Amino acid sequence: MKDRKTVAKEILQLIDQETNKLCVPIQQGNSVTIKHMVVRESAQGFLVINVLTDQQVACTFSKTAAVAIAKSHANGSATHTPMILKIDDKIQQKYNDCVHFKHTIYLSEDEDRKSAAEIRYDVAWDDVITLRSELDPYIFG
């Protein structure tokens, strides 16, 4: 008869083996693992690393884009990477616009300038949300 620790270890190994077959993102600390792909946060953004070849596949601004690239590579298709990176660049531009408009709202004393910046901020933030939703088919599809 096996003791509890041995049985628990065997169950965890079985679970790990089965989850590696699926293409499901697993959060482990500050990284996300999808099969043999790992997404890690760095000073440059989010790195997508292929653990099998120990190579960096991409560096993205948003975590959503990094997960989308990792998922497409885990499925064996790297053809979507350029499109995902283009969407990620647009997300970065719109997010930087949001930061600029928020700064303008905070510092401006002119009410007309504030209201214009608030409208532009809302439009830019809606664009960020829309662009992030464009990445959903790459993650969930």
Image (tube, rainbow, N blue to C red):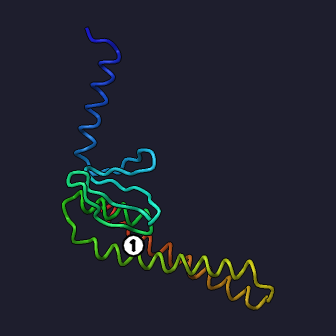
Provide the residue designation for mark 1: 134
Q: In what quadrant of the picture does the C terminus appear? A: bottom left
Q: Residue at x 41, y 44 (%)?
A: 28
Q: Residue 8: x and y, percent?
A: 33, 22
Tell me the kind of residue under disc 1: Glu
Q: Residue 51: x and y, percent?
A: 26, 51
Q: Residue at x 18, y 60 (%)?
A: 76
Element at label 1: helix
**Front-most of residues 101 and 49:** 49
Question: In this image, 1 relative to 97: left or right?
Answer: left
Question: In this image, 63 relative to 113: left or right?
Answer: left
Q: In what quadrant of the picture does the N terminus appear? A: top left
Q: Residue 53: x and y, percent?
A: 20, 55
Is 3 above or below relative to 25? above
> Residue most toward the bottom?
112
Badge count: 1
**Front-most of residues 137 and 110:** 110
Q: Residue at x 33, y 72 (%)?
A: 84
Res 101 quadrant in image: bottom right
Label 1 packing within 10 angstroms: few (<14), some (14-19), many (20+):
some
Q: Residue 81: x and y, percent?
A: 28, 71
> Residue most toward the top?
1
Res 10 quadrant in image: top left
**Front-most of residues 47 and 126:** 47
Question: In this image, 133 relative to 13: left or right?
Answer: right
Q: Residue at x 41, y 51 (%)?
A: 31
